[in-house]
Amino acid sequence: MTKLYEPSLPKLMEAIATEAKGMRGMDRRNFLKGGIAAVAGLSSVQMIPKANASANLPPNLPEWQSYLGRGVVAKPYGEPSEFEDLQRRTVPWLTADAASSISMTPLQDLEGIITPSGVVFERYHGGIPNVNPDQHRLIIHGLVERPLVLTMDDLKRMPSVSEIRFIECPANGGMEWRGAQMEALQFTHGMLSCCEWTGVKLSTLLDEVGVKPEGKWILAEGADASGMSRSIPLEKALDDTIIAWGQNGEALRPEQGYPLRMLNPGWEGNTSVKWLRRLEIGDKPWHHREETSKYTDLMPDGRARRFTWVQEANSVITSPCPENPLTQPGFLEIRGFAWSGRGKIKAVDISFDGGVNWERAELKGLVLSKALTQFSFKTKWNGQPWLLQSRAIDETGYVQPTLKQLRDERGGWSIYHKNSIHTWNVTESGDVFNVQIS
Amino acid sequence: MFKSLNLGVAAVALAVSGAVSAGPLGIGSTATPEMIAGWDIDIRPDGTGLPAGEGSVAEGEGLYEAKCASCHGLFGEGAGRWPVLAGGEGTLDTAHPEKTVGSYWPYASTLWDYIHRAMPYPAPQSLTDDEVYSISAYVLYLNDIVDDDFVANKETFAQVKMPNEPNFYIDDRPDVKNERCFKNCADPKSFKIVTTINGVTPTGHFKEDSGVAANHYQGNPSDANGGAAAPQKVAMSDAATAGKAVYDKACQACHNMGVAGAPKVGDVAGWTDRIKQGMATLNDHAINGYQGANGVMPAKGGNMSLSDDEVKNAVAYMVESSQ
């Protein structure tokens, strides 16, 4: 059912528009507008002078229809059209070195819930190791009856599963705890991807080695230069952890842990240890660097939360967004993604006035547990300013919080797990800016 | 009879699969104690996993200055964006918390484990156990957690208590509860709208001429060096060509960004006076280490597994990229 909705709050929006005129971000309009035009200019079709371009338009015969195209296996492993500009991007000043850094997925360009493998966000603690799968081994030992060493062939003989699950860095949005910093969706929310993962359930492997009764924790360790390691409780391992070798229908990409990774659905990405070489079963957690010094959550009283594994419900509008401004009035489908580390998305709401009033959006496509879920809201835009927000509700009843609620609880200088309702300011010109309402 | 037959079957199974007894799927081989010993590198807070050997604060000082200080600073203060290791006491409940080994880390074992598994950054798992004990002891000393006569070993290290240990607690989220309200949920009069901070979005990504160096800081467009390796216009020597791979592996961590006074590759001004000293001097500094006015060049960049020739090739690459 198509529902057309026009917010009937002219006075409120007028007030917001007036207030917005004083914003520092307004003078950024020209930069971003110019920048987007420049990006569009990268595609060669756009660079053809207008007179030539019209030669391909009706009623003329398009140039590409006037001769034979490329044949089969001209590119045995295909690639996107040259007119597309889908790419990971990073924030160079964020980290000291590219081998211990992060890049972001272009969520603003994604069509559907599957993130193409080539643009899944990257997070390395010691760069990408170049692992030869024939010489890669997984050792499982510790408090087990039968310590095992497994080849990739061994693992692929085991009963396998395929699941569509998101993976998200807990620092997603973390640059915005103190204030709005990033002028693009890719940088505010792009440490997030969703793929189909294929592998063996960790519970199957644990059956194979026979965990002793005192075994309660598992250390997962990578074969990268950082020897990435995290302690995983047995409850998670027996629930839904996958030891994966497949991603979106092919082998894992090197960036995602080729040839073997752990995947802890719904949990902060760094627990899903890549290039997995070792699982040790123990009776206590190890408290390694990435679960003490990093990936713990300092609270305002100086104490810190540890083992903050779950990525709580979150959502963001991907169109419009700073990279996808509104170009003309009329019909508009507002689109976005919602996700929850606790299960399925139950509902998503949209606000046009900064959270004063809310409307129900529709979920569309597949609604899967711990996976990106698309939402849609059909409306009209007639040049009015909006403070556009989305609010996710998951199947546990958890409602995505406001930034104020998070800051009141956790202070303003946290790093991880910022899942607050996000605000895009849509201006009369159709430009979209990242703002925060406090 | 029955008993001895069982033993016989078990012996055959051992001989065939190498497994003590098979799991439900019967897939995989027994991980031998030798295999496990080589990979089982983890240390726990109770000291489980700590090896034999020992190292003192005094021994750690020299090792730290040679292998760690170029990134972490002589006193653990950190260079550039590399981690600060010392200081920060009393800052955790302020608006600018400084999370260091001394102010934040709950367990000393984590220090040993991490230095051993991942440091020095360009040469992981290259330190001996004694060296790890020494450097760990010195970092604890920099944080006033042990005295200058401390000698770390399996027994003494496991007894070190970190001051911030009691301040960690298990995740207690969900910690906030939003309501699914639909009408008049907030007072727009109270809205304070905060916009983006000028100048921090990496605008280079939006510019047509930003090139392919997406991982490199674009710098100020007016800065000819741009902060990143300059495109090569002339053919390189064979040594420099061979040195590129060494540079990528062992040198770029500092020489790309200019950490600890390291001259950036492509920064012609920064290299001119250095190149004037001659290749012999540059190679000597790179191979044997050097304390300069601006910072420390660790011997072989801290990666002692490199041959002298590999280091020379890397120097050639950097020099020829910076003229």
Image (spheres, helix red, strand yellow):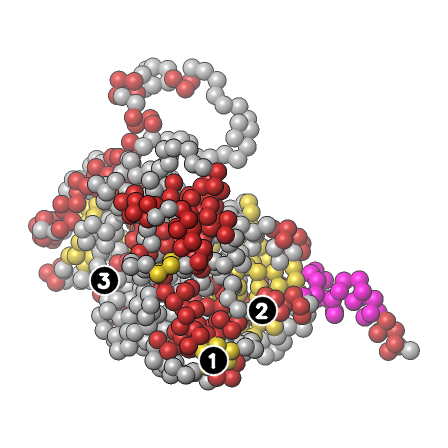
Labels 2 and 3 within one chain: no
| Numbered circle sitting on residue B40 | 2
| Residue B116: % across, % down | 49, 68
Q: Is residue B203 left or right of residue A397?
A: left
Labelled pair 2, 1 in contact (Cβ < 8 Å): no
Residue at figure coordinates x 28%, y 70% from the top left? B98
Labelled pair 2, 3 in contact (Cβ < 8 Å): no
Q: Chain of mark 1?
A: B
Nearer mark to the viewer, of 2 and 1: 1
The answer for how far apart the CA atoms under marks 3 and 1 are is 41 Å
Residue B212, by quadrant, is top left
Q: Is residue B40 left or right of residue A56?
A: right
Q: Secondary structure at mark 3?
A: loop
Nearer mark to the viewer, of 3 and 1: 1
Residue at figure coordinates x 12%, y 63% from the top left? B190
Dot 2 amino acid type = Asp
Q: What segment carries the magenta color? A: B9-31
Residue that badge 3 annotates? A178
- Residue B13: say if magenta: yes
Q: In terms of depth relative to the viewer, which is nearer, B184 or A390?
A: A390
Residue that badge 1 annotates? B152
Q: Quadrant of the C terminus of chain B?
A: top left
Q: Secondary structure at mark 1?
A: strand
Mark 2 packing: few (<14 Cα in 10 Å), some, or many (20+)? some
